[in-house]
Amino acid sequence: MRQHPDPADRSQNEGRVSIPAVHFFFPLTKLGLVFFDQGKDLPFNKYSWLTTHNSFAVTGEKSATGSSLLAPTNQLDTVTAQLKNGVRGLMLDMYDFQNDIWLCHSFGGNCYNFTAFQPAINTLKEIQSFLESNPSEVVTIMIEDYVKSKNGLSKVFNASGLTKYWFPVSQMPRNGGDWPLLSDMIKKNQRLLVFTSKKAKQASEGIAYEWNYIVENQYGSDGMKAGKCPNRAESSPMDTKSKSLVLMNYFPDNPNATEACKDNSAALVSMLNTCHTDDGDRWPNYIAVDFYTKSDGGGAAQATDTANGHMVCGCDNIVYCKANATFGTCDDPPPAPRSPPATTVTPPGTSSFTSDASITSTTFLRGELIATLSIAVVLLL
């Protein structure tokens, strides 16, 4: 987990702390259909993917050990629900525990009953089921790796059935080149990218070392300071063009579902623009947040749509992209909606939500649905 990294964890994990999209109603891989039809599909690194920090640490869940959990949580729904909602990047902390590999938070660099969530195989099988049921989707797993057992990660991935979707390290660009076309990755069924924080495992287990391919900004509260987007210690500088993927973290040291409403709103979009400048005019490929469903506006999904709009068509949002148009030709944005009241609002046919509610508010249920229908119309043209 990224909160309060323990010195013992750093010495064993080269400073690794967890790493870790698309429009909620409309998975981004399908947005590429416009480009598939024209033979202009884009490389994987020309898209942005919504990513959940500590994806496994779900509020209200109990430890599979039977113990009460005394560990912080970072999300409100299961990995299966996250994937169905458009999340395509998952940050998982893996440890040796009870002669198996578990998803866990550390206490003094170790996993205990009261910090262990569940065996990793359970979550990996959720991902396997999603990929099997959705043959045009691509998922990235970023592992904060504390596994010391020999070939421990390889064994759990083999047991999960995920290796048939594995994107091989040998095909990952090392010098800043473009990744394969998204359509080609789908056609070849190379729809799972896995990165580890342990450098040696790229050679020993064929699992890509994250910072060979990704630049990443500072995690935690130090990475949320307005106007700054510094790289984390293990990463190359953010403007390093020899790494073709960019990860933008935006979450505090101590997860807070209520504060996430504010964090995942205007401040997130502001950081998106700051990091774009500091990244050498590159938009992030992964946008990692806590409580991804929480915001006072469009939230993390809207931030991801914004990045995709700039990368895919040169527009301020993916919903403004026009089919069969040159780059930078955009639909006019709709008029800004009136500010919602600060009190409880009840959209027709829905339950009541307070202004503290997440993307599942009026904006999510109405505005995002309208945006989705707009995309669907474009694709049908």
Image (cartoon, rainbow, N blue to C red):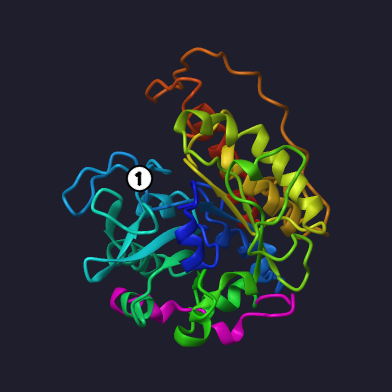
Q: On the image, which quarter does residue 228 sit in?
A: top right
Residue 314 visible in the current orientation: no
Q: Is residue 177 magenta?
A: yes
Question: Which element carries disc 1, helix, strand or loop?
Answer: loop
In depth, the one of 347 and 204 nearer the eye is 204
Q: Above or below — where is 256 with respect to 170?
A: above
**Please, what is the three-letter code of the amino acid marked with disc 1?**
Val
In depth, the one of 41 and 146 nearer the eye is 146
In the rendered structure, the answer to whether residue 105 lies left or right of residue 117 reads: right
- Which residue corresponds to mark 1? 58
Q: Which residue is at 51% across, 27% downward?
A: 362
Magenta span of residues: 157-179
Quadrant of the image for the C terminus?
bottom right
Q: Which residue is at 47% across, 68% downward?
A: 12
In the rendered structure, the answer to whether residue 101 lies left or right of residue 348 reads: left
Q: Which residue is at 55% across, 62% downward?
A: 15
Q: Above or below — where is 323 with respect to 4?
A: below
In depth, the one of 87 and 1 nearer the eye is 1
Residue 4 visible in the current orientation: yes
Q: Position of residue 220 (x, y in %)?
A: 57, 45
Q: Position of residue 145 (x, y in %)?
A: 44, 67
Q: Is residue 355 magenta?
A: no
In the rendered structure, the answer to whether residue 131 lies left or right of residue 375 reads: left
Q: Position of residue 101 (x, y in %)?
A: 30, 68
Q: Which residue is at 65% across, 39% downward?
A: 268
Q: How many marks?
A: 1
Q: Above or below — where is 165 with respect to 274?
A: below
Residue sitting farthest toward the left: 66
